[in-house]
Image (cartoon, rainbow, N blue to C red):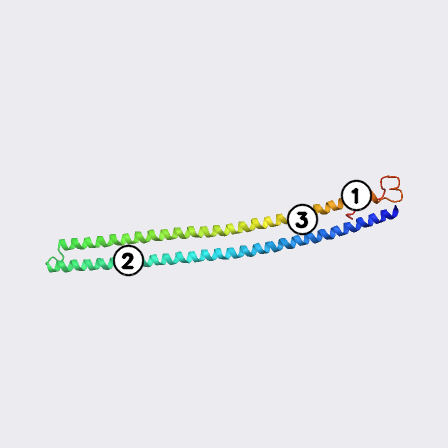
Amino acid sequence: MVLGAIIAVGAAVYGASEQRKAQKKSNAALAAQEAKALAFLSKGKAAALKAQKKGISFADESFQKALSAAGTLGGATRARVVRRGKQQSAAADAAAADRGLYDSTAALGYQRGVFESTNQSLAGVDDAVAGLMTSIHQARGATALQGYTGMAQIESNFAASAAGTSMQNIHQAANVGAGYAAMGMNFAKLLMMYGGGAGGGAGGDEPDVTYNYYN
């Protein structure tokens, strides 16, 4: 019976040792798996952020070109209006001179009409250009906001995926630990059943030798 107890104790100690080794190996494998998954997620996040930033920069450059084009168009239109006003004024002076009305009230009135018409046209050009630029600025701001919101979403998605990966590995480690704990209980039961010394086992008494396999 003593020999059986020695064998049982030896088996339990060996089993506990192997259990610890297996659990450490399993935990290391889970940690490596998590690190690899997080590295993959981080690489994907970096690529997504780079693409998003590139899109924001491209859109901003496009809006800047649109603003420049609007300013150029406005300047060219104003120049045409001013040129047309001068032509009309010169034509009016020539017509008045031909009729001997140069510097007359009628001629001056016509010149005043040309001046007012030119100013109204210039004001219309300025209003149109201002409206166009306002629309461009608004679209530019909305696009930038959308782009930066997308970047924030990328960060949020990465954080959620990383947390999910870590939590999954925590659950796996807990399940593995629970399995090894159950094995430990079996070793403990084995010790309780067969680990008694010379005074135990023959008469069915409780064993008087126990061993803590966690030592």
Which mark is first along the chain, 3 or 2? 2
Q: Residue at x 73, y 45 (%)?
A: 181
- Secondary structure category for the residue under label 2: helix
Image quarter of residue 64: bottom left
Residue contact at pointers 1 and 2, CB within 8 angstroms: no
Check disc 2 and report the residue beneath it. 77
Label 1, label 3: how far apart the Cα atoms are: 24 Å
Q: Amino acid at mark 3?
A: Ala
Taking depth in this image into account, of 123 and 17 the one nearest to the observer is 17
- Secondary structure category for the residue under label 3: helix
Task: Tell me residue 2's x, y (percent).
Answer: 88, 47
Residue 189 is marked as: 1
Taking depth in this image into account, of 79 and 212 the one nearest to the observer is 212
Task: Tell me residue 19's x, y (percent).
Answer: 74, 50
Task: Tell me residue 201's x, y (percent).
Answer: 87, 42
Check disc 3 and report the residue beneath it. 173
Taking depth in this image into account, of 202 and 87 the one nearest to the observer is 202
Label 2, label 3: how far apart the Cα atoms are: 73 Å
Mark closer to the observer (1, 2): 1
Mark closer to the observer (1, 3): 1
Label 1, label 2: how far apart the Cα atoms are: 97 Å
Which mark is first along the chain, 3 or 1? 3
Q: Amino acid at mark 1?
A: Lys
Query: Badge 1, how many Cα within 10 Å: few under 14, some, many 20+?
Result: some
Left or right of 176? Residue 155 is left
Query: Badge 2, how many Cα within 10 Å: few under 14, some, many 20+?
Result: some
Residue 150 is marked as: none
- Secondary structure category for the residue under label 1: helix
Task: Tell me residue 21's x, y (percent).
Answer: 73, 53
Mark closer to the observer (2, 3): 3
Q: Residue at x 70, y 47 (%)?
A: 177
Left or right of 175? Residue 56 is left
